[in-house]
Image (spheres, rainbow, N blue to C red):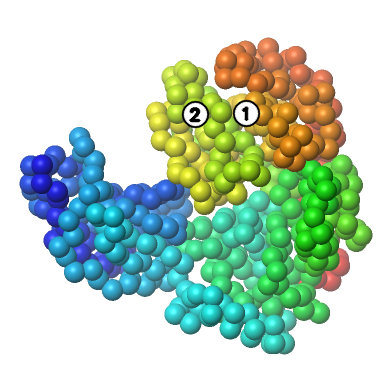
């Protein structure tokens, strides 16, 4: 069979929607779709019934119920779908110049016997690249910006507008609408709430707001380029109660680590803790001598008050009546991709036709690997807010992730799947307490044990009722639906805004 040929290529914008227009000649090939396929997203268009395939592939998409977003930055291979899919294409068409849009930039290139579209953040030419960023950073450090009654928000290094910063922003939206809310995001694929403003990381405006906003609310490190101004305050919300050891509490942290930790924690004016246990750990792990704000987690306010479950189920694609098992392992220090000790695609089938398996990799694995695809399995690693997923879950399966603490407030069962418990606890991180002794659900090591625990979940729930109650009392007494209100009030009382 002759290879298909790409004979025309063009970027176009019709009714405000940008697209890649492709003409493919594929004589003798049964082609059903033309698609752009990436690691975490794809777009496709139906193929024409003859040998010439004219396709218009949209470059703004809906992601998890949010419309009009860019594709996540990365490479997308042009692929013909059908009985035999192929990305091996002869490119006879002239490649159009780079396409620029307020949410993304796109560039086509012929590579590896086919065609690849590279999507990147919408940075101007004088903002793109190391030289430009060094120049912008130097200007940022020299400037004396005018204070702005604004909050700079960042979650998971700009990969989503979620977690505790989102819970705080929601309260600000209601109670302090005059305060501008800026979200630092990596690119135009990240949805932000209506009324808030998107800041593309590295843009000139991003650098400006980083220096002018009165308050910065982040859930991870600010990284080395931040320089605090006299008018600024930083609230470090962090992103979970901890089982595994952090920062200075890890075994034999090196000199560079110790210096970096102390430099970073020195930038924080306040550190939010979900509970008294976390507050104690933070003071040790980050040598944090200023007071912690022990107010509970704003990210769990929706979980406590009840989210719009039907809307979330529709966005994720869960059939009505299906029982939801959420598998959410943490990341590993010795690998970049999500762990899979279960063969997840076949494990989803083993759960039975009345179940759906949601697979949620840690935020640090988002940039690595590809979304899993299988019947009755939905890879939700890219879903913006884990609190929504916890609201959906009938059963949580995790290992050492902090979601074990957040999920407790639902009263629903949790199972700990820990095939590498000895290696993780001894060689990789170490624990603050004995999980086997205190876990509010069964700790299992094998696939068969996990399937049995899920099948017998009601018996399991009753067996661990007392331990689950003690767990909630210790770790989630403040997750009452009003944590965000308390945090914002403390910011106001302290004169930050």
Query: How would you rate the neighbour count of disc 1 (Cα within 10 Å): few for under 14, some for 14-19, many for 20 or more?
Result: many
In the image, residue 331 lies at what x, y percent? 63, 42
Q: Position of residue 366 (x, y in %)?
A: 54, 49
Q: Is residue 467 left or right of residue 135?
A: right
Inspect this view and state whether residue 129 appears: yes
Relative to 260, say whether 480 is above or below.
Answer: above
Q: Closer to us: mark 2 or mark 1?
A: 2
Residue 356 in sight in this render: no
Residue at 59%, 60% in the rendered image: 158
**Residue 344 disc label:** 2
Q: CA distance from mark 2 to mark 1?
A: 12 Å
Mark on residue 397? Answer: 1
Checking the image for residue 148, the label placed there is: none
Instruction: Point out the tag, 2 or 1, that comes first from the N-terminus.
Output: 2
| Secondary structure type for disc 2 | helix
Q: For the point 62% across and 77% down, which residue is it? A: 207
CB-based contact (under 8 Å), mark 2 and mark 1:
no
Q: Position of residue 211 (x, y in %)?
A: 69, 78
Q: Quadrant of the C terminus?
A: bottom right
Location of residue 341 (image quadrant): top right
- Relative to 330, say whether 397 is above or below: above
């Amino acid at each position: 069979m002759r290879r298909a040929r790409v004979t025309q290529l063009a970027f176009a914008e019709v009714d405000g929607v940008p697209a890649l227009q492709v003409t493919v000649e594929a004589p003798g090939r049964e082609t059903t779709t033309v698609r752009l396929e990436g690691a975490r997203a794809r777009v496709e268009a139906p193929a024409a019934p003859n040998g010439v395939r004219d396709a218009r592939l949209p470059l703004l998409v809906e992601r998890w119920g949010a419309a009009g977003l860019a594709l996540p930055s990365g490479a997308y291979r042009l692929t013909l779908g059908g009985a035999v899919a192929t990305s091996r294409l002869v490119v006879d068409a002239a490649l159009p110049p780079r396409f620029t849009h307020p949410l993304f930039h796109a560039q086509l290139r012929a590579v590896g016997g086919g065609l690849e579209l590279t999507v990147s953040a919408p940075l101007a030419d004088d903002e793109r690249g190391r030289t430009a960023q060094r120049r912008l950073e130097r200007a940022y450090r020299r400037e004396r910006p005018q204070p702005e009654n604004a909050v700079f928000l960042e979650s998971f290094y700009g990969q989503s507008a979620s977690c505790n910063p989102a819970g705080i922003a929601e309260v600000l939206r209601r109670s302090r609408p005059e305060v501008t809310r800026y979200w630092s995001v990596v690119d135009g694929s990240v949805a932000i709430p209506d009324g808030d403003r998107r800041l593309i990381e590295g843009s000139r405006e991003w650098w400006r707001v980083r220096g002018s906003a009165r308050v910065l609310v982040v859930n991870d490190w600010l990284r080395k380029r931040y320089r605090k101004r006299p008018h600024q305050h930083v609230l470090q919300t962090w992103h979970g109660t901890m089982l595994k050891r952090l920062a200075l509490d890890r075994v034999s942290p090196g000199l560079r680590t110790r210096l970096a930790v102390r430099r970073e924690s020195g930038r924080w004016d306040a550190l939010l803790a979900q509970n008294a246990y976390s507050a104690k750990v933070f003071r040790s792990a980050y040598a944090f001598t200023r007071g912690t704000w022990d107010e509970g987690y704003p990210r769990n306010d929706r979980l406590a008050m009840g989210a719009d479950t039907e809307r979330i189920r529709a966005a994720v694609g869960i059939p009505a009546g299906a029982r939801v098992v959420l598998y959410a392992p943490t990341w590993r220090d010795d690998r970049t991709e999500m762990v899979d000790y279960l063969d997840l695609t076949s494990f989803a089938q083993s759960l039975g036709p009345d179940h759906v398996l949601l697979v949620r990799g840690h935020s640090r694995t988002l940039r690595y690997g590809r979304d899993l695809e299988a019947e009755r399995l939905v890879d939700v690693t890219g879903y913006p807010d884990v609190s929504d997923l916890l609201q959906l879950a009938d059963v949580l399966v995790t290992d050492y992730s902090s979601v074990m603490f957040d999920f407790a407030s639902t009263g629903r069962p949790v199972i700990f799947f820990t095939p590498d418990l000895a290696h993780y606890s001894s060689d990789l991180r170490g624990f603050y307490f004995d999980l086997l002794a205190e876990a509010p659900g069964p700790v299992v090591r094998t696939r068969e044990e996990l399937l049995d625990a899920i099948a017998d979940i009601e018996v399991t729930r009753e067996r661990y009722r007392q331990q689950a109650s003690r767990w909630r009392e210790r770790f989630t007494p403040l997750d009452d639906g009003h944590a965000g209100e308390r945090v914002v009030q403390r910011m106001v009382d302290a004169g930050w805004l």
